[in-house]
Image (tube, grey):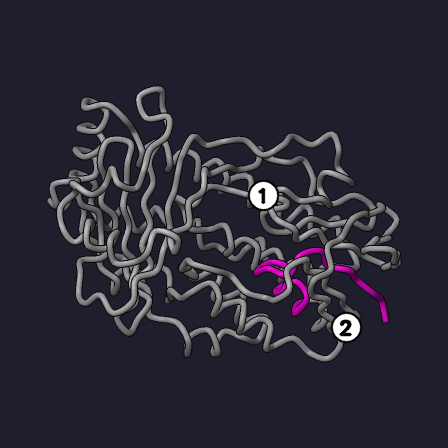
Amino acid sequence: MRTVGIIGGGIGGLATALALAGAGWSVTVFEQAPALTEVGAGITLWPNALAALDHLGVGDDIRRRAAPGWVGGIRNRQGQWLMRTSEERFRAMHGNFVAMHRADLVDVLRTALPESVTVRLGSPVTGIEVGGAIRCGDRTENFDLLVGADGIDSLTRQTIFPEYPVPRSLSIRAWRWIVDDFGVVDVGGILGAGTEFGIVPLGNGRLYVFAATRLSKETPDPSLDDFLDWPGPIPQLISAVAPEQILRHDIRDLPALPSFVRKSVVLVGDAAHAMGPHLGQGACQALEDAVALGAHAHDVATYDYLRTGRTHRLQVRSRRSARIILTRGAGATAVRDLVLRALPAELFLRGMGSNFSTRNMM
């Protein structure tokens, strides 16, 4: 049996472990944290992600634990609708999608791992060699294949691809949190000048809430308090949780990398193609990577061919979406809002279709 060492036990690493175990590989996952979990945020699993999870054999488990996805629409800061969309029309065009807590997704993937997968918790990797060696503490192990699933600051990428560019700032600060038992609210996005607020239902009264501000000379250090004068229920959603329960990140992505493969080392997920959140495709693409690698682990050049072009296009589209959504200035904001009002919802929904293609997954 051929062996693979996977560096990172997040969504991408666990999904890849599941895919490669299903393809007959003996899998070892190295995870530096003492437990497999994801904290503090929700995730939308779009139709392409559900297709990947179905291929991995856990799609039904995901649907049982997730809430049906909502496409509520977009409002301006005054609460006026710029665009309203229909879940029924979305599903007719593109298929089903769901939303859930990221920790629940990790738990489903972890529970599904077969006995051929060994997960080593509390095991930070300190060295990697292109020939297939992993050093963890004072122990070195050799594998037929190495998979770097170790995130945007990937040690695997830095070690094996030292000439590659480093992550870059998108000049966006984001906050994410979960609110329990809040009640009924209008879901979707609310846009201001260089700012946005989003509400995603996770079922049973639970909401995934996020906010973002574009950094600038005028707002070099924005605060979530800047949203407290927005209309309800935004101030109430901010005050519904303790400040320490709110995650804050300055968003980065990766430039398009020329290849995700070098000899017997492969990159997946954010280690390969970290992208901003404005398409909701980051984790979805990691799931696609897992399925593609499971199908082509004996021919990683095919994996590389399938995944680079697909993810490069989404990285560009995500950056473009961020620029539009978080546009600044009264004039630019007015133009953005006018275009959104004039854009038919049907055309908007149809334009999302290429995000959910599964053509480059297998």
Q: Is residue 80 left or right of residue 100?
A: left
Which x, y percent locates residue 28? Answer: 76, 66
Marks 1 and 2, how far apart at CA: 26 Å
Front residue of this view, candidates 248 and 330:
248
Decide: is 82 above or below 202. Answer: above
Residue where numbered disc 1 is placed? 273
Any magenta on residue 11? yes
Which x, y percent locates residue 67? Answer: 34, 71
Residue at screen point 38% across, 64% down: 99
Label 1 is placed on what type of residue?
His
Magenta span = 1-19
Image quadrant in which you'd find residue 177: bottom left
Residue where numbered disc 2 is placed? 24
Front residue of this view, candidates 266 and 271:
271
Which x, y percent locates residue 345? Answer: 22, 49
Badge 1 crowding class, 10 Å Cα cut-off, few under 14, some 14 to 19, many 20 or more, is: many
Label 1 sits on a secondary structure element that is: helix
Residue at screen point 73% across, 72% down: 117
